[in-house]
């Protein structure tokens, strides 16, 4: 399977967010996540974004690795 399309930039694009490096870094600094909130339950997602994240985790899809990276990035 080709995992090259499952990058942070492609995840941001999938979520409908700006996906250049600066935008990704800005997003991570502007949206810190506490240790008690699940990523999909974060208040900054719209319903479609939250559902995408929830479904990908539930299905243990190829997106999970990069979703986990995003989760860690937001919890710094």
Image: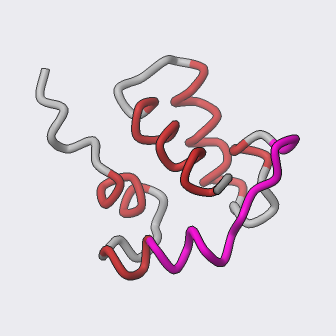
Q: Which residue occupies 81% across, 44% down?
A: 35
The region drawn magenta spans 25-37
Above or below residue 2? Residue 16 is below
Q: Is residue 63 left or right of residue 71?
A: left
Q: Is residue 34 magenta?
A: yes
The number of numbered discs placed on residues in the rendered structure image is 0
Compared with 51, 31 (above or below) is below
Question: Residue 31 at what x, y percent from top left?
Answer: 69, 69
Quarter holding the N terminus is top left
Q: Give the image location of residue 48, x and y in percent.
A: 63, 53
Q: Residue 66: percent from the left, percent from the top?
A: 41, 40
Residue at the front extreme? 76
Give the image's coloring scheme.
Answer: secondary structure
Q: Quadrant of residue 52?
A: top right
Quarter of the C terminus within the rendering: bottom right
Q: Nearer the viewer, residue 47 or 5?
A: 5
Q: Quarter of the image holding residue 53?
A: top right
Above or below for 28 versus 74: below
Kindly indicate the quadrant of the structure image that contains residue 57.
top right
The answer to whether 11 appears left or right of 39 in the picture is left
Task: Please name whichever residue, 51 or 6, is drawn nearer the observer in this view of the structure.
Answer: 6
The image position of residue 70, as x and y in percent, is: 51, 49
Q: Residue at x 52, y 18 (%)?
A: 59
Q: Is residue 26 magenta?
A: yes
Which residue is depicted at the point 61% across and 74% down? 29
| Observer-nearest of 14 and 7 | 7
Q: Residue at x 35, y 71 (%)?
A: 19
55 displayed left or right of 63 = right
């Amino acid at each position: 399977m080709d995992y090259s399309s499952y990058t942070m930039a492609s995840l941001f694009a999938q979520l409908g967010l700006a996906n250049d490096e600066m935008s990704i870094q800005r997003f991570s600094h502007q949206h810190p996540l506490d240790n008690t909130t699940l990523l999909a339950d974060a208040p900054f997602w719209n319903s479609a974004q939250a559902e995408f994240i929830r479904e990908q985790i539930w299905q243990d899809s190829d997106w999970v690795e990069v979703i986990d990276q995003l989760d860690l990035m937001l919890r710094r």
